[in-house]
DNA sequence: CCCGATTCGATTTTT
DNA sequence: TCGAATCGGG
């Protein structure tokens, strides 16, 4: 097994550990993810388990895809090396990595639920997945029908609901009775419309397993081996789910299962940054209590960063007393000093970053790669034009009409250098100032996050038609689609329709409604014989959407081109049979994460610290290192947890391979008014000798 | 019921 | 500062 030589001794111990629980608890960049990947390849190539008997949970879809590729490559190499006995090529042994079940908790749960949800009525397998916007609409609908003895903001109510679910709070323990009622009505509404929100995807899967031991037992047999990456960021529901899957019942032996739990978990308690949505790093610290037979491996050698960066990061993480101590070291002694800069405000901050990027990108030494004269249309052909188009008019980005033309610069930039650069910030709103400066300077960049592509109105419109075709109970999608284009059905009329009281409608509204539902019914009838492209086409034709969106304005043309792009995306599912094609499209869209696009695009990357989890870049800029921003104001309030902010800074710093820039500003405009801000405690934690002050 | 004008409130992080 | 929510006239 040649590939084992890519591992150090400790990694090898983890990868070749005997069956049973294994925990790899180790610091940043120490090769945890590599160990997990090789463990999968090891299990398959030693024929301990077939590929399709393995479940691997990753934090993003992209991580899953990458891991699949790597496992596949390892196995291919392994099989070539063993040509003499190639009669058992992996075809007889399950296809290599493609049949490993890999994905995020959410996507794995969806796949389970599509098959099994009819066991927990009233849901059925055509259920709609509600994104946060849909949930918000549902909450609003509920609050409208509520006696308003006081004002409750829908957003607040939604966050309470999500927090009850994520923290597994018993309803009896919720003190404020109003929220219990809101919660119950919300849940009832979702059941009525056959919809699950993000939290429900996990919650209902747990419920399914708890209420149906035979189904649980089936999945235990399906996946006798389970691996979890980023274990420190599992929340209590995810923990429960894993625990259910790997626990061995009395009948285990009969079904050929090992008598001990086969779980391989890797993570770093110091990198737990999703506490706000219920993640509990105690899960990883308590692993040995949970699984007393566990093999525990620590990895101490860091392969990513320089010693300077590690030293600084180690000092920073000490600010959080809750973390387990680790002794990270690297052979990469010394390295460049960490560069610290203080700017006057956010624009100056952006300019400093831009100037440094230009310096780096102009260094073409030791590079044989092609360089490019910078032109406005310089951006490479993207693999995801659809998503790119939607980058405009984002919540936090610069809207189309406010965009200045990129100034063509005379100097040449090395594209491959730009790709190795990332700028990290605490809040999405910070991206705007950076973008403005980058455009001025003509620095190619791309922004990760801040927009989910289906947030565009025209896309959400069409998706609501599609959801409605699949799931006729989805009255939330109905409420949206029913007035696309406007057909004179307002709140009052819609309420009657929703209550199945269409008889009471005014003549005008009744005609509209009958016309609408006839069209929808006719599409539904033929849908099974059509490809997904044809279905969308039919919707557009029947409801005159082209005329509606293309109103002659340039915005209209934008809208229409977005619709065209939706066709492109849908095309990927055109060959799937009904209704899987449509389900798969809607699912991909609902569970799509902006982080999944990282690396596909050219230019320097801009993203939040959270999105940087698990990634690495040669050069990392961290901006906004001020008290109030990192750590964020909200974390300084009483009862809040500042340690997570420290861990966030630790995650950011340890993304850097060679160069780390830390930048703070004296002041910053927030909501239009200026504030002056003190340097972050994170800066103060770093010993002077590791820093170089640059102006 | 529709649409324009004005007021309001939001920024922590995300599947 | 800017987009969403709300209000009132058509
Ligand atoms: N044994 C090894 N020899 C050389 N390089 C290695 C080895 N193990 C891992 N690496 C490299 O070190 C880097 C970090 O590895 P990996 O992403 O697996 O670490 P990690 O512990 O998961 O990091 P993090 O917790 O920060 O996400 C990668 O570039 C990887 O290729």
Image (tube, coloured by chain):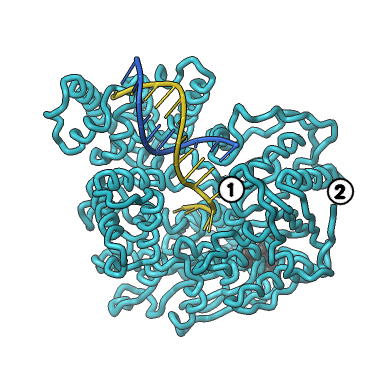
Chain colours: A cyan, B yellow, C blue
Residue A379 as seen in the image, left or right of residue A275: right
Answer whether residue A126 is visible to the viewer in this image: no
Instruction: Between residue A291 and residue A406, name the one nearer to us.
Output: A406
Question: Where does the image place residue A628, in percent across and percent down from the top left?
Answer: 62, 59
Residue A41's place in the image compared with A552, above or below, is below
Instruction: Between residue A333 and residue A356, name the one nearer to us.
Output: A356
Snapshot quadrant of residue A237: bottom left
* Mark found first going from the N terminus, 2 or 1: 2
Question: Where does the image place residue A298, in percent across and percent down from the top left?
Answer: 61, 77
Residue at (36% x, 64% y) in the render: A222
Q: Which label was assigned to residue A428?
A: 1
Snapshot quadrant of residue A174: bottom left
Residue A258 as seen in the image, left or right of residue A17: left
Disc count in the image? 2
**What whole-number distance in Å separates the C-alpha atoms at marks 2 and 1?**
35 Å
Snapshot quadrant of residue A221: bottom left
Residue A128 as seen in the image, left or right of residue A384: left
Q: Residues within 10 Å of mark 1 (few under 14, many from 20)?
A: some
Instruction: Between residue A516 and residue A224, name the one nearer to us.
Output: A516
Q: Which label was assigned to residue A537?
A: none
Answer whether residue A146 is visible to the viewer in this image: yes
Residue A471's place in the image compared with A14, above or below, is above
Mark 1 element type: helix
Q: Which label was assigned to residue A366?
A: 2
User: Can you tell me which quadrant of the image ligand 1 is in?
Assistant: bottom right
The label nearer to you, 2 versus 1, is 1
Question: Where does the image place residue A682, in percent across and percent down from the top left?
Answer: 69, 65
């Amino acid at each position: 097994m040649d590939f084992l030589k890519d591992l150090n001794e400790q990694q090898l111990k983890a990868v070749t550990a005997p069956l049973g629980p294994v925990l790899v608890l180790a610091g940043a960049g120490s090769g945890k993810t590599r160990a997990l990947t090789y463990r999968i390849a090891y299990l398959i190539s030693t024929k301990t388990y077939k590929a399709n008997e393995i479940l691997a949970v990753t934090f993003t879809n992209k991580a899953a895809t990458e891991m699949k590729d790597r496992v596949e490559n390892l196995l291919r190499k392994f099989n070539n090396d063993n040509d003499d006995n190639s009669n058992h090529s992996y075809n007889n042994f399950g296809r290599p990595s493609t049949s490993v079940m890999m994905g995020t908790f959410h996507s794995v749960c969806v796949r389970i639920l599509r098959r099994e949800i009819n066991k927990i009525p009233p849901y059925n397998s055509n259920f709609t997945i509600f994104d946060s916007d849909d949930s918000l609409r549902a909450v609003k609908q509920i609050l409208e029908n509520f006696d308003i003895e006081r004002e409750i903001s829908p957003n607040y109510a939604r966050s309470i609901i999500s927090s009850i679910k994520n923290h597994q709070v018993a309803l009896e323990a919720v003190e404020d009775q109003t929220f219990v009622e809101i919660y119950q009505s919300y849940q009832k509404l979702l059941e009525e419309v056959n919809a699950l929100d993000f939290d429900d995807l996990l919650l209902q899967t747990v419920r399914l397993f708890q209420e149906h031991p035979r189904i649980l037992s089936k999945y235990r047999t399906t996946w006798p081996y389970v691996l979890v990456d980023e274990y420190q960021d599992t929340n209590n529901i995810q923990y429960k789910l894993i625990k259910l899957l790997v626990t061995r019942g009395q009948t285990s032996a009969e079904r050929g299962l090992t008598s001990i739990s086969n779980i391989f978990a890797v993570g770093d308690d110091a990198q737990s940054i999703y506490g706000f949505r219920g993640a509990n790093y105690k899960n990883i610290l308590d692993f040995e209590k949970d699984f007393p037979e566990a093999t525990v491996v620590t990895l101490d050698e860091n392969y990513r960063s320089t010693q300077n960066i590690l030293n600084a990061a180690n000092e920073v993480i000490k600010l959080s007393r809750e973390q387990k101590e680790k002794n990270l070291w690297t052979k990469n002694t010394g390295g460049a000093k960490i560069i610290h800069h203080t700017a006057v405000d956010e624009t100056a901050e952006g300019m400093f970053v831009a100037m440094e990027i230009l310096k780096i990108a102009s260094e073409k030494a030791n590079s044989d790669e092609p360089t490019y004269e910078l032109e406005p249309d310089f951006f490479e052909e993207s693999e995801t034009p659809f998503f790119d188009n939607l980058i405009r008019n984002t919540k936090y980005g610069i809207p189309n009409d406010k965009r200045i033309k990129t100034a063509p610069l005379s100097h040449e930039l090395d594209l491959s250098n730009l790709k190795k650069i990332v700028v990290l910030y605490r809040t999405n709103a910070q991206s705007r100032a950076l973008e403005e400066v980058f455009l001025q300077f003509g620095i190619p960049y791309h922004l990760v996050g801040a927009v989910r592509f289906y947030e565009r109105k025209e896309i959400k419109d069409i998706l609501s038609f599609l959801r409605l075709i699949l799931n006729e109970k989805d009255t939330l999608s109905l409420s949206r689609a029913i007035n696309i284009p406007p057909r004179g059905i307002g709140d009052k009329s819609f309420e009657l329709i929703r209550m199945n009281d269409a008889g009471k409608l005014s003549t005008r509204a009744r005609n509209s409604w009958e016309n609408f539902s006839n069209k929808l019914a006719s599409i539904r009838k033929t849908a099974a014989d059509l490809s997904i492209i044809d279905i969308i086409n039919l919707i557009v034709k029947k409801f005159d959407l082209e005329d509606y969106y293309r109103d002659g304005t340039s915005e209209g043309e934008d809208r229409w081109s977005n619709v065209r792009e939706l066709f492109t995306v849908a095309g990927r599912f055109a060959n799937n049979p009904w209704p899987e094609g449509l389900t798969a499209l809607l699912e991909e869209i609902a569970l799509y994460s902006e982080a999944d696009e990282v690396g596909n695009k050219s230019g320097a990357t801009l993203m939040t610290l959270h999105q940087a989890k698990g990634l690495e870049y040669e050069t990392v800029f961290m901006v906004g290192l001020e008290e109030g921003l990192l750590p964020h104001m909200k974390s300084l309030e009483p009862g809040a947890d500042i340690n997570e902010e420290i861990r966030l800074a630790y995650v950011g710093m340890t993304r850097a391979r060679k160069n780390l820039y830390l930048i703070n500003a004296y002041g910053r405009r927030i909501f239009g008014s200026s504030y002056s801000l003190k340097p972050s405690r994170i800066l103060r934690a770093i010993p002077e000798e590791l820093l170089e002050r640059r102006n």
